[in-house]
Image: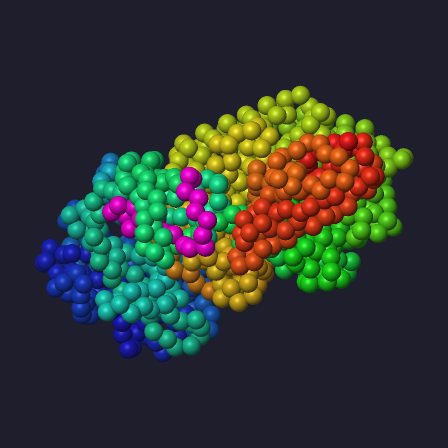
Amino acid sequence: MKSDEYYTWGASPIKGEDGLYHLYYSRWKKEYGFLAWVTHSEVAHAVSEKKEGPYRFSDLALPARGAKYWDGLNTHNPTIHRFGDKYYLYYTGNTGDGRNMKSSLNPTHRNNQRIGVAVSESPYGPWKRFDVPLIDVSADSTAWDAKMIANPSITQTPDGKYLMVYKAVAKKKGGLWGGPVVHLCATSDSPTGPFKKYPQPIFTASGSDFPAEDPYIWCQDGLLYAIVKDMHGSFTNRGRSLALFYSKDGFDWKPVKSPLVSVPEIRWKDGTLTKLVHLERPQLLIEDGKPTMLFLAADAMEDYAKEGVSFNVHVPISNPRRPVFKNYQPLVNQVGYNLNEAKRFVCFGAPDNTPFKIINTRTGQTEYEGRMLYGQGWFTDFNPRTTDEFIVEVKDRGTSVPFWIADHLMEKVSGKLAYDFFIDVRGSEDPVHSNEANVYGGGPSRDQGAFGLEALYELLYYSSNPALFDNWTTELGDKQTADLIDLMLWHGEFAYHHVDFNGPIKNRHGTLGYEGEERMIYDYWNTLDHLAPLCAAYHSFLKPYLSKEKYENYRKVCLEKWEAYDRHKVVRYWTYSTKWVDYGFQEFNEMGNVFGQSVFSNLFMYLCELNEPDGNPDKFLKYAQESAQDIIDNWDFNNPRHMWWIRNGEHITPQALAFFLMVAPDKAPEGTLQKLRAWANHIRQRTNNCWQYRTHSETEFAHPQTKELGGAPALGGSLFAASYLLNDDALRRLGWAQVDFVFGANPVGTHIGHKSAERVAKNGFWEGVEYGWPDAHPNGYGMLGSCRGTLEGTPLDGQFPRSGSYQRQAEKDLDNIGNFAYATEGWAISNRGWMATLTFATLGSHSIGVSDSDGNEISSAKVGDTVVVELKAALNIHWDKRDKGWVEVKVGDELPQKISVEETDVNSGIFRGNYVLLKEAKKKSVVFSYGYMGFEKTCVLEVK
């Protein structure tokens, strides 16, 4: 319904005893402007022979009746009901000065809004109105409804009482308009009251002063339901939208598992799509106890000061049968799988023993067959050496997208992107004068502080596969050094020059410091956790790149401030968060203090001090041991505050214990390995589902409102580390399942990074991925739209199917700012966890050995022999040529030297080089090694 003369809004339908359909709606003349809904609206009545219309104007149900009445100048937002043999027309009314302000709301009329009801024995009237509101504002100035009330919705509950839900505005925020805006409940034994108010708001969302509006409630099959306008996407994760709630008692309302009813757009019968600014005021036509038609108010007006068009629209409803499993297509890792590693896909709901095939897309030939089990299809033993692509075909379920299988495939497509992100996300190109006041969080990365620990994880990433990064040298520094080396040195300089920095910064989601102490704006304590790894690496591989002067400055400031900055212990209750997802002081927080952070930092200082004549390594070893013991004693896997609630920082705890066992296994506290094994067993239990996703509990897969990029993307690295140290191949398979989840084997069916045109154009997205994360938030706090390799989101709890149908969402290259970015904006510490997964994956795939010229593995040789060094490593980044690398050779106490190795064949992942044993090696041990900082793969050759 729409009119050339009037704006129309908020239509409420009912079927009358006359067999006709009656519609009650708001209207006001266009000459007054759209914002005159608050001063000149009247409730009109239209009639149709069919529920779908067309509806013809019949009469004015609630016209103006004079300013002396509480509702005398304005009636608005009607909702019609029939209880017993009478019709009850509930509405919002007001009075005031009658002044039409055109470009803004009249505040007097807005704040005079109250709730009323008119009663009639016929849908045509006459309507009996009352001289006082049905519900008025509360006299208590601290009440949630002290300022104004509006928008009633009512239903009769199974016990015969009447439940009303209404919009309320408090005076708590002060000012002309008041606030917050909430919804309250009231009950009565009669449809005309009196109503008893209840003080507890409903449809609330943490961190929002106006989360919902326009609820329509009804009772069906013994439960109460509500369709609500979700103002910001707090419940649907789709921005301004309509959400479905349910309640057993009318006071405790929860979103259903998949709450989205509609986004603001209309798909018409002819298939055309209309994008809207507003789609709201849901009202249902209920027949025989079931909703049959949804009526909505709509407009596409961006500027209410200008004349536009509003209208009412109706949407047919088919009442669904009991949910059943639909035919999910097979979901794979869209890039593909590493040769000789675990391989699986997910086909949710596919019965056990359903056959599947792996088909070569070039030849059309079936090359592997298997059967489904628990919604998964495994084909780990399928290891073809080819550049052909494959698809999965599951009987009665269709086919997957194409994928590759190749040696170190994941490292091939991800190796550079993993750190490209950290180049792009820097708040400034200058680490010293870094424009902190214009960077959210202050930097080094946008929307982040020093808690990002970039230098630490960049160092580990380099240590795990150092020769790989010689392939990329032109983006930073002197154009000859590996960009990743230059990047970690950049982060070191930033940390050093911000070691006492405490603002100003553009913003941060909270403050730092212990409760009761002076607040910090910037987490400068964490800068030492960047410098300590570089101090350790100076004695390992950084000496050619980090000057002695800078190293000594870094070490000096660490030694001076270590205890003052509480780097010597596990830091608890230090970050005060203002984010709704972890508001207040938590024991551990991703934005400043993570369980395990101190283990890493003290181990790095221990490794540094071991190489200094005046060093005190024992002090830092003691700190590391005490921190690890703290984890052993207090890490509670069943406490979400120690696990998934730390979100992007969770991966640090198991990785810190693993690192201790990698660099100083004989110095780690007793019980370190056992604690890591206990954690691994807990994760096994929590990932016992077809997605192999770590769940929160028996009933909740993931958070219902915010992404969990600290989950699967980072969990793989922790599982790879545990697998290596516990010698448990099953954990490694579980680690690869997390990687598969990242690349599309998840309920959304996409990669968790958004595949924008801008990223693709700059080689900033993963080769071979067909579908990226459907939503984007490129202009948020981190301004990540142009960052290569960004991870955007993960499925929310409601997207994990218990039943229902899977539908991949279309991607949109637009900014969903305001559309609940918690579920779709990336973050630097999220990408840190993904880089950690690539780092620890090498523990189970790299190896080094020495053989004679005939290919026999040897452990001793004599002077003058030529031996062959063989390295298996993720250095094969090219599809069409043999790659090169290097290993280090250390003879006795001499300094190590690099020797070149070359790939044996294209994409083989095996690299060989010859080494001649000179006379200087006689009667000495020759150590061949690859990697640093606990990631070393070594082979010792005794020379006769």
914, above or below 808, in the image: above
Q: Residue at x 40, y 66 (%)?
A: 277
Residue 617: x percent and y percent?
81, 32
Closer-to-camera residue (728/581): 728
Residue 440 found in image quarter: bottom right
Left or right: 207 in relation to 467: left
Residue extending furthest toward the left? 18
The reply to whether the magenta stretch includes residue 388 is yes
Residue 816 visible in the shown view: yes
Could you tell me which residue is drawn at 28 percent across and 41 percent down?
355
180 with respect to 931 (left or right): left
Residue sitting nearer the eye, 431 or 721: 721
Quadrant that contains the C terminus? top right
Q: Residue at x 65, y 41 (%)?
A: 853
Q: Which image quadrant for residue 40?
A: bottom left
Residue at the spot 55% in from the left edge and 51% down from the top edge: 905
Residue 918 against residue 779 in the figure, above or below:
above
Q: Is residue 588 visible?
A: no
Q: Is residue 720 left or right of residue 915?
A: left
In this rendering, position of residue 362 left or right of residue 820: left
Q: How many marks?
A: 0
Q: Position of residue 839 (x, y in %)?
A: 61, 44
Where residue 484 sits: x, y (%)? Answer: 68, 53
Query: Which image quarter is the N terminus in?
Result: bottom left
Q: Is residue 6 magenta?
A: no
Colour scheme used in the picture? rainbow
Of residues 276 and 742, the one nearer the viewer is: 742
The magenta stretch is: 380-398
Q: Is the residue 133 above or below the residue 627 in the image? A: below
Main secondary structure type of the part rendered in magenta: loop
User: Which residue is at the far right?
Assistant: 614
